[in-house]
Image: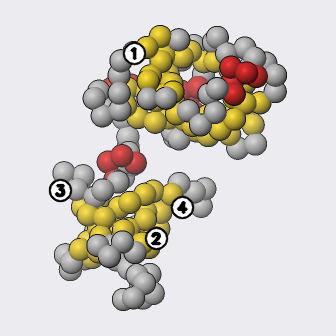
């Protein structure tokens, strides 16, 4: 592991995984994959490990599927004690290493903070979070009064995403917005 000096926001780092816990006694860690490109965890790939505010480069030794997540071995992490110290650490890549997205695909960090508008242009709030689910993703809209509601991120409700204008235009049905 080596300190890279890179920080999120400086060179545009993207989170690709979260280490949840150690697994077994040989240094494996269970990783929640935050990327649509699980090939990032193939042997030999280099990632940035964020640990206590510092970033170190780590190299994947091996990985395999495990209960909807990945079991990952990192070079130099060869026992449970070392793996335990990585609990809740995030794995990142420099944005320049990210794959090109297809039409209608967006990076989570691009969507968070965007204004959410009705089709008539009235503002509902801002995107506070994104929930990635197998059935469908959804955005959490935070209203100016701090109340929140969910909008499924599907064409029926999300009519337009304008990255340049930082707006998402939605069509909602009755009952989706509390108090409306």
Other residues around mark 3 within 10 Å, as few (<14) / some (14–19) / many (≥20)? few
Which of the two labelled residues, at mark 2 and mark 3, occupies the earlier sequence position?
A: 2
Q: Say which label, 1 or 4, has the lower sequence index.
A: 1
Distance between the alpha carbons at the discs numbered 3 and 1:
33 Å
Q: Are marks 1 and 2 in contact (CB under 8 Å)?
A: no
Find residue 50 and report its horizontal and vertical position in percent: 48, 28
Location of residue 162 in the rendering, given as x and y in whole percent from the top left corner: 24, 57
- Give the Cα distance between marks 2 and 4: 12 Å
Cα separation, mark 1 vs mark 4, equals: 36 Å
Q: CA distance from mark 3 to mark 4?
A: 25 Å
Instruction: Please indicate whether residue 149 sits to the left or right of residue 10 in the image.
Output: right
Q: Assess disc 1: are there few (<14), some (14-19) or many (≥20) residues with their C-alpha within 10 Å of its C-alpha.
A: few
Between label 2 and label 4, give the one nearer the viewer. 2
Q: Is residue 109 above or below residue 42?
A: below
| Marker disc for residue 4 | 1
Labels 2 and 4: the sequence-earlier one: 4
Write down the residue under mark 3: 165
Q: Which of the two marks, 2 or 3, is nearer to us in this view?
A: 2
Helix or strand or loop: what does disc 3 sit on?
loop
Extreme-front residue of the structure: 52
Q: Mark 3 or mark 1, which has the lower sequence index? A: 1
Q: In percent of the image, x 38 and y 60: which residue is there?
A: 128
Give percent across and percent down for residue 30. Answer: 69, 34
Instruction: Quote the CA–CA distance across marks 1 and 2.
Output: 38 Å
Mark number, residue 150: 2
Task: Specify which label sits upstream in the sequence, 3 or 4.
Answer: 4
Q: Quadrant of the C terminus?
A: bottom left
Nearer the observer: mark 3 or 1; the answer is: 1
Q: Is residue 19 above or below residue 3?
A: below
Spot occupied by residue 29 in the image (x, y as percentages of width and height): 69, 29
């Amino acid at each position: 592991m080596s300190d890279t000096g890179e920080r999120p926001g400086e060179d545009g780092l993207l989170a690709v995984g979260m280490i949840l816990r150690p697994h077994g006694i040989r240094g494996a860690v269970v990783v929640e994959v935050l990327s649509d490109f699980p090939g990032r965890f193939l042997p030999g790939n280099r990632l940035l490990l964020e640990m206590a505010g510092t970033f170190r480069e780590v190299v994947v030794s091996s990985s395999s599927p495990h209960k909807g997540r990945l079991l990952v071995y990192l070079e130099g992490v060869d026992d449970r004690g070392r793996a335990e110290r990585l609990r809740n650490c995030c794995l990142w890549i420099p944005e320049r290493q990210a794959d090109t997205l297809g039409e209608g695909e967006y990076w989570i960090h691009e969507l968070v903070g965007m204004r959410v508008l009705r089709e008539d242009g009235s503002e509902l709030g801002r995107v506070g979070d994104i929930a990635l689910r197998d059935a469908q993703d959804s955005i959490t809209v935070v209203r100016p009064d701090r109340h929140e509601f969910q909008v499924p991120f599907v064409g029926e409700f999300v009519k337009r995403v304008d990255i340049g204008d930082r707006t998402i235009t939605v069509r909602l049905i009755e009952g989706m917005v509390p108090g409306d």
